[in-house]
């Protein structure tokens, strides 16, 4: 069993596999796994689309920052971050203070294949297509790259394989 010294934050575009990978990584490490979007939904007692519709994106982004403040007080764990978490420098500074940031990256086509049937992604409503996803990814990519301690390409990989790569990169612990 490996004892984590810091949180492991998974960042990247929506649909890249952060949540599934974080669950796998949590199991492999024997630590708790948390999803910031789930934490916000629980705290707000409403869905993300409802938060966006009623309170707006800026409110949601503040909720993300508050979640990072909460995580700072908790034992090191694996954290799956919402796709926009790394867009705010304040959030990146908080993540760097308490953990290591892993950028999970995939092609727009892979992302589309993962999200095409989703109805709970407010930023893609009415824009569920590869060109729009590519454009939004290109806007966010510099922020993801700047925030990341490590970048892992996930195309063609299963979540278990991505978790193994993270362990090898971060912890020097091959799983096989």
Image (cartoon, grey):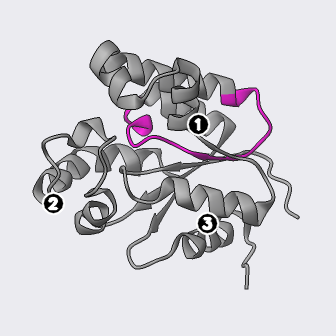
Sequence-earlier tag: 3 or 1:
1
Q: Nearer the viewer, residue 36 or 144?
A: 36
Q: Which residue is mark 3?
A: 166
Measuring from the top left, give residue 44's x and y in whole percent. Answer: 52, 19
Q: Which residue is mark 2?
A: 130
Q: Residues within 10 Å of mark 3 (few under 14, many from 20)?
A: many
Sequence-earlier tag: 2 or 1:
1
Measuring from the top left, give residue 49's x and y in whole percent. Answer: 33, 30
Q: Residue at x 24, y 62 (%)?
A: 108
User: Mark 2–mark 1 contact, CB under 8 Å?
Assistant: no
Q: Residue at x 37, y 55 (%)?
A: 15
Q: Which residue is mark 1?
A: 95
Regarding mark 1 in the picture, which secondary structure is present there? helix
Please name which of the two marks, 2 or 3, marks the residue nearer to the observer.
2
On whether residue 11 falls in the magenta region, the answer is: no
Looking at the image, is 155 positioned above or below residue 69? below
């Amino acid at each position: 069993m490996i004892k984590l010294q810091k949180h492991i934050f998974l960042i990247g575009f929506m649909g890249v596999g952060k949540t599934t990978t974080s669950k796998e990584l949590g199991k492999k490490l024997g630590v708790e796994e948390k999803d910031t979007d789930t934490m916000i939904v629980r705290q707000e007692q409403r869905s993300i689309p409802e938060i966006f519709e009623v309170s707006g994106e800026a409110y949601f982004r503040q909720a993300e920052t508050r979640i990072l403040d909460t995580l700072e007080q908790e034992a090191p764990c694996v954290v799956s971050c919402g796709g926009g978490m790394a867009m705010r420098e304040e959030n990146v500074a908080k993540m760097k203070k308490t953990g290591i940031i892993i950028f999970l990256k995939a092609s727009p086509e892979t992302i589309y294949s993962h999200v095409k049937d989703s109805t709970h992604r407010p930023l893609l409503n009415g824009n569920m297509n590869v060109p729009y996803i590519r454009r939004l990814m290109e806007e966010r990519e510099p922020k993801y790259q700047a925030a990341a301690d490590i970048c892992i390409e996930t195309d063609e990989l299963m979540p278990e394989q991505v978790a193994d790569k993270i362990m090898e990169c971060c912890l020097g612990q091959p799983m096989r």
